[in-house]
Structures are given as C-alpha cells and as structure tokens.
Image (cartoon, rainbow, N blue to C red):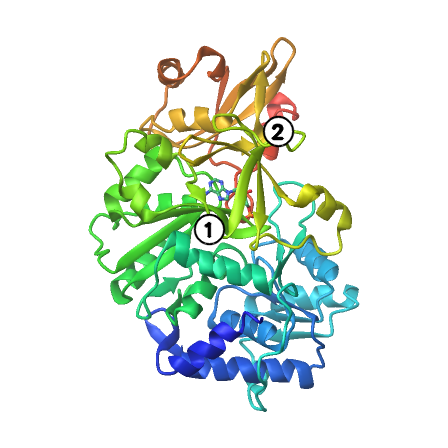
Amino acid sequence: MNVANLLTRAGRSSAERPAIAVGADQYATYGTLANRVASLAHALGRRVGLAPGARVALLMKNCPAYVEVLFACWHGGFIAVPVNAKLAPPEFDFILGHAGARVCFVTTDLAEVVAKLKPGLDNLAAIVCVDDAEYATLFSGDTMPAASREPGDTAWLFYTSGTTGRPKGAMLSHRNLLAMTLSYFADVDQIAADDCILHPAPMSHGSGMYILPHVAAAAKQVIPASGGFDPGEIFDLISVHRGAAFFAAPTMVHRLVDFGGAGAADTGNLKTIVYGGGPMYVEDCKRAMALFGNKLAQIYGQGESPMTITALSKARHAETDHPRYDARLASVGVPHSVVEVAVADAEDNPLPPGETGEILVRGDAVMAGYWRNPKATNETLRGGWLHTGDMGVFDGDGFLTLKDRSKDLIISGGSNIYPREVEEVLLRHSAVAEVSVVGLRDREWGEIVVAFVVGKEGEKIETGDLDALCTRELARFKRPKQYRFIDALPKNNYGKVLKTELRLHFAKPEDERS
Ligand code: AMP
C-alpha cells in the first residue's frame, strides 16, 4: 500500500488532464506529473543515494515542485518532512536535526538560511533548490515503479505547530493518508475531475493534506503565483478556475470577507471553502455565508489525526431552519467515518452527551506515534486512544462542540468558564475585530476573566458597551473583569492565537506592557 499509487493511477487514466497550475497558467498534466515524480524518485534513490525510510525535508513556500517532491518521496519509499517555511531558523534547525533529514528541498528564499544551518546538521547530505538548474537535472534519468510499502510505514512526518514547547513529529503512515483521503469524499466534499483545489495556505500543513483527495480525483492543484495568501489574488484565481475549493484558517476567511472588492467579486466558480485549524465564531461564519452562499464546510483535525476528527458539511451549514442551527454552527460537526471519537474524563472514562471532557480519537487516520519520542507517544496514545488535548462536549445528536484546550479553561470562584463562549459574545459587538479571553491569577477568585480586544480600524469601543453585552448574554460569573485593548493578538505562524503570550503580558511590569 503506497499512497503514491493515487498519482500513478491518475497519470495513466487521466494523462491529459491538468494536474498543476500556477496562477492562471498550466504547469503540468497528470501524465507529465506522474512521469516527473517517477524519475525524481529514481534520482533520489540512485543518484542521491537515499534508502527507503530516509527522511526528505521540504522547506519551501508553496510551488509546483512541492507536489512533485512530496509524491517523489512516497514513490521512492522515503518519508516526507514538510516544514513550515514561516518558522524561525532555530526551529528549522530543530526539525531538520530531529527528523534526521538527509536531503532538504528549498525554494530560493530559504536556500541561504538552510545552507547556514547545514554544518551543524550531521545527517544532512544535500540541499536542493527547486528554482535552480540542478533540480531540472534530477528529471533526466530513468523512472522507477512506486516502491512497495507496508500500510503502517511512515509517509509524512508532521511536525505539530505547538503553541507551547518543542514541535513533535507525528508519524503519519500510508494507511493514515489513505484513510484521510477517503474520508474527505465521505464526510467533507465531492470532487469532480474538472474541479480544482487552490493552495493559499501552507502546503507544509493544512493545505498540503488537500493535495491527496484532489490527486485521487485527478483534479487540478492551483498554486497562487505569490506562493501564499493574498485575498485579491484568491478572488482573481476563482474568476479563472472552475469548481474551486480551498482550505482557509478562520483568520483567512475574515480577511476574504473584509476585502474591499469582496462584495463585487464574481464567486460563481467557487465550490467550497473548508475552514478549520482554529475556532470560527458563529457571527463570522454567518458573514462568510452571506457573502459566498452555502459554500462553507468545516473540519476539525490535528496533525495527529489529520483532517479527520469531525466535520460540519455544507449540507449542515445550509440547514438554517434547524431549531439548534446556531449551536450546530458553533460546533465542529460529527465524527469522520474513519475514526471513533469519544469525550472522556481525566481517568479516560467515557462521558455521556452534555458532559465536557477531553476529546479522544482512534481509528485508521490516527498517527502511530511521535518520531523519536516514546514518552510523548505513550502519554498521547495511552489506552489506544489519541488524547487530543482539546476539551469538548457531544450533544444528543452526536455533534461535538469544542470547549477550548484544557489549559485554556478558566476556573473562577470554583466555576469553569470556557473562553470561547465569552469570545463568541464579545464578537457580536460591531466594532470588535478580534478577541481572546484568558484567565488572570487572582487572590480572591483563583482566576478572573480578562478579555483582550482588537477593535476595527477607526472605531471606538466603550468598555461599558462590552460589559452590557456580556451582562445580557452571559452568566454573571463569566463576565470579563478586565478589558485590555491591543493592536493585534499574538499568533503563531499558523495563525493560532498564543494565549500563553497573552498570559505572559501580566507577568511584565505595568510600564512594559504594550
Ligand atoms: P494542528 O495540529 O496544528 O493542526 O492543530 C490542531 C489544533 O487546532 C486542534 O487540536 C484544535 O485545538 C485546533 N483546531 C483544529 N480544527 C479546529 C476547528 N475546526 N475548530 C476549532 N479548533 C480547531
């Protein structure tokens, strides 16, 4: 079982179909792509000397070579290690060293920084820049058939984003990736061969996973010429590519909705926006649906069970008459077909609907463990279940709602307060752009609720109005006791809010706080 066979199949059965476009221009058909991948895999084995199981790092911004290198790794039986190009050099250094990468593929913008790290990386034998002539020479030799792989063999080392601590490398096997691919069709969206997937989000992370179901369907991968996310460019791409889907973190969805030309843009070609990776607030979801129509689907997953914990389909988004519509929009949907999802107490006992606990997952999409980290593996996979670290609650219909990560829970005067609930309410204020709620240590209460608020440009927010809103909508004990107005929320390279940094803010002396 080798996930690369999806491309071999598409290369044969859909040889003439477009496989990759950059901006509006075609880069390769499926026939060409499959052939290039088979020769690159051959070159990596024969010329570079990689043995099956060798790790190959991809430290590139989004580009067509990303798809080639990723599939060449699998085709040759190697392990792909996609690394987020936005990380800092010490983080690159850690991941390349920890994975023991033998080869690192880079784009020009990252070539220098990796070259500087190389002397300290004993395993790293070669750096290949995909924009240089050397890359082209790797396609000049023979091709090879896809290497034979066991279902449990690792295909992708997915380094977690980690809002705290060192990243860990989730070992995703060929079976995991195939289960994830099939689950996309079963639970998220259908893909026709003349549809396409745009890649404005990093391929090292969220967007990269979407390559697979689209290769399985022989649909086109569209890489923005900028290699990243630019709202204007996305609207342009939608105007030229039919049946377009893409993955967007909630912050990207906001930026699209707020984009000046959004209202006038022709989004007829847009098929689906899959959002996830962080909380999407109900108000924001409704605003996006008002602009794009019923084209939103949600996925809840994590590197350890990629794209595959729960999904809220487009059909569910369209059920506006349902009596619990808002609650469902605030949920992350129902479990994917390829996994079992449970909510459990601190001793891993399953909890009934209505009770909040840690979300556990098991099934074919769940990683085998963390690379070279048996301690974290045993802890996270204890009892055969993936412990997500996310807190959640099932309703009676099987819809799961996230209640923040356990460490984000605020306990004030003995009562549990889920920051998300308070954030949802504050976002209803028309001048609030973003908000994040954390607990601050307090002698009397244990913790008190503090809201960090980012206002919309040029708009004024009165604390009294926010307080009145919370008084109306929330139990008294959940109301923020303090509001802090800041210019921007601290976020990591994946757009996740760093609550730890917000909390650190309080540790600083008053005059150093920004
Ligand atoms: P990562 O492994 O970097 O993809 O991060 C996964 C984490 O992002 C999950 O454990 C959740 O805390 C969060 N997350 C992912 N999808 C969603 C979603 N749809 N809604 C809210 N949080 C999400």
x then y, percent, for residue 158:
61, 56
x then y, percent, for residue 202:
50, 58
Q: Residue furthest top?
A: 444
Q: Which residue is mark 1?
A: 337
Number of marks drawn: 2
x then y, percent, for residue 193:
33, 70
Q: The C terminus lies in which quarter of the figure?
A: top right
Residue type at mark 2 is Asp
Q: Secondary structure at mark 1?
A: loop
Label 1 CB less than 8 angstroms from ligand 1: no
Residue type at mark 1 is Ser
Foreground residue, 389 or 46? 389
Q: Is residue 69 left or right of residue 433?
A: right
- Residue at position x 47%, y 61% in the image: 181
x then y, percent, for residue 408:
58, 29
- Residue at position x 49%, y 12% in the image: 477
Distance from label 2 to label 1 (Cα)?
24 Å
Q: Quadrant of residue 113?
A: bottom right
Q: Which residue is mark 2?
A: 345
Q: Is residue 79 left or right of residue 195?
A: right
Q: Secondary structure at mark 2?
A: loop
Foreground residue, 429 or 514? 429
Look at the image and tell me whether residue 163 can be seen. Answer: yes
Q: Quadrant of residue 102?
A: bottom right
